[in-house]
Image (cartoon, coloured by chain):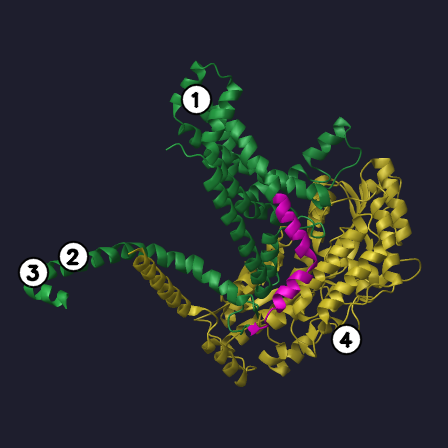
Amino acid sequence: MSRFKSMISLVMFIAILLFISACNMMPSEESTSNSAAEEETDQQELGTLDPENPTSVTFYSYSLSYPTMKPGMEKLISDFNSTVGKEKGVIVEGVPDPSFQQNKADIAAGKQVDIVQHVFSSLDASRLTLGFKAYEDVFPQDELEEHFVGISENALELGKIDGKMYGLAFTFSTPIVFINGDLFEQAGLDPNDPPTTWEEIKEYSLQIKNTTGKDGFGLPPANGWTTDGILFSNGANILSEDRSEAVFATKETFEALSVWKDIYQNGGHAIGTRTDMTEQFMAGELGMYITSTALHSGFINASKAGGWELYGVGLPQFGDQPSVPVNSGSVLAVRPDTPEKNAAVWEFIKYVTGDEGYTTITSEIGYLPLRTGLADDPAYLKDFVDANPLYRINLEQLERIRPATIWPGNHATESTTIFTDAIVKSITTDADVEETMTEAENAINHLLQ
Amino acid sequence: MSKIIETKINPTLSNNIESVKKKRKKVNVKPYVYLLPAVILLGIWMYRPLLTTFQLAFYQWSLVPGTTPVPVGWENFLRLFANKDFGISIYNTIFYTIGLLPFSIVIPILLAVATHNMKGRMKNVYRALFFIPLILAPVSVGAIWRWLFHPSNGLVNITLLDLGIIDQNIAFFSDPIFAKWLILFITGWKMIGFSTIMFSSALTGINRDYYEAVSLDGASRFQTFKDITLPLLSPMIMFMITMSILFSSQWTFAYIDILTSGGPFGTSTNIYYEMYKHGFTNLDVGLSSAAAILFFIVFSLITLGLNQMTKKFAFNDN
């Protein structure tokens, strides 16, 4: 009898398993063949938009999830919706995308994700895995050429992979040293004569610590991108020209990291994560802080509230070699799927990377105008840049800039983790810099092969 | 031959036998029909994902609809073993699992016994106090702990500096040793509430006659605890050990994600967090599934072992 029972349960169990696995075990053949069919049709065509029946477009933006940047980005979106969007028939819905996870999750879940504010380092990986499309494949060539007039050539190169543009540079900034003027004066230093070399950074940070008791300098060991610029400034490279192998374990890297480690461990350096240090600087408890100018608007408000003056200076240099800052910030990556979507997405991109868009991005958020001419145009940003001289530092740095590392393809996130972890270990612990970085380079090259 | 003769002679009897057989068959199918809804739900939510995981472990896929998984054989497992954080995540999983046992067994038993004999309202007040950490959302609790241990403005650093215990701020969650221990402590703090309630309910189930009997025999409070309470709690203790071991990875996950993201340089991560990172941050489902399969096998073995131990050691007062 019991054998009969277990037979029944076994049969039922298998039947149910078969039933549910038949539902949808893997992405079906159908969806694959669909995408293949799509590729054959001409995708560069822009559909017709109807203002009576607007096309809705989603825009995933990490700026929407940071309190310092949110109001500016919201203004950008609502300005578009109430002007060009209304006229042409496009409604853009902003979706906050903290730590760049929301767009991946929603793409994986099959939701509509049209435009993503995407960081540089993982663009190649996303291109391969998330179905982002090259601009040349979805927008007409003449429209692109017309729009790109006025954007600096360097900036247009940033989002290109294998000769095709997978992202149009959007928000853009360089790292600078933010300075708390009051702490400088309390320490007997002149904020108008800021440190320009790493030796001076060390000296000044110790003086601030010894006289005011507050931390003199902060550069988070896991900072996402500034480290690239520090290594470049000392003549090091991170990836080889053809991006096929990591080449950062060199004398120049070890030297640059040892200088930073020395400053980090001498007692005048703030400790903690990037969030911790940002909070500390905004609370007026930190003398100098290297971070993206994107935080400018937040810092201005904090300094006004705390009653101290905000100053700044460019990225420090090693000896007499000029520093080589990297850009932080984002590109706009797109994945429209119909001609109508192409047209709607293109309208939004034209607006936000146009004259009005960059005026808002610079004055309300703090990123650089990639249409650099705007900074001298009285109709747009001249007054603002004159009132906020920190932006001149940023614009000057643009001339020496080098793109931040775009890690290759499918191992981008793993490589970034290995690289960042090795930096953190080198700087914050007693671990040997040379050994740690060489180990990391080998591990990354093992992945890339 | 004889059977046929019997049937011929006594057809009514054979009819009776057949109808009884039919009845039995009907009765046998019924319970399975009742079970069906539950089994289907379990199948959809548990067994199907389980099977899919086994399948995905041998593919490379980014989860994006419209893309096709590429079969890669055992490649994912090889990559997993070569991953620099894999070893440390296993070590930490063991660290968190063992480290949580005092918080899930020892302290809750003492708290439950201490509050058990209280009279009146205070008993409930104390129990509510122990239980509150459990119902607080991990994300908000994480934020509060982060502020408390903030390297420059946190209460803990300020207090320690004022007391002269340290002479420099400590970045607790950026320190490879503190980060791990704090995550253990915070998870434990939450676990205490759950376990205390479980043990309290188990204590209520113990027959009071035993206590009266031993008190007549002049047993001390410690002897009562050791010889009556502990043995009678043993089924619950075994159950809680199992739960604690199985939950430790899940419950530390939230705090690892909020407080350290597995860092500094991967020193506070556990296998659960690695699985999440591979799968949903790196969109590398194959690697994540490979880790999940190892996790599944190891924890199934542990559960089986604990089940055997429960049968052997737990004393049920039936």
Q: Report the quarter where the C terminus of chain A lies.
A: bottom right
Percent from the top left, x then y, of residue A442? 78, 64
Q: Is residue B34 left or right of residue A222?
A: left
Q: Which residue is mark 3?
A: B12
Badge 1: how crowded within 10 Å, few (<14), some, or many (20+)? few
Tags 1 and 2 both on a single chain: yes
10 Å crowding of disc 3: few (<14), some (14-19), many (20+): few
Q: Residue at x 69, y 36 (%)?
A: B154
Give whichever of A193, A438 is nearer the camera.
A438
Q: Which chain is green?
A: B
Can residue A327 be seen here?
yes
Q: Can you tell which mark lies on residue A242?
A: 4
Residue displayed at 50% across by 83% down: A37
Identify the disc placed on residue B121.
1
Pointer 2 local density, CA inside 10 Å: few below 14, some 14–19, many at least 20: few
Residue A167 appears at what percent x and percent y? Answer: 65, 71
Magenta region = B70-96
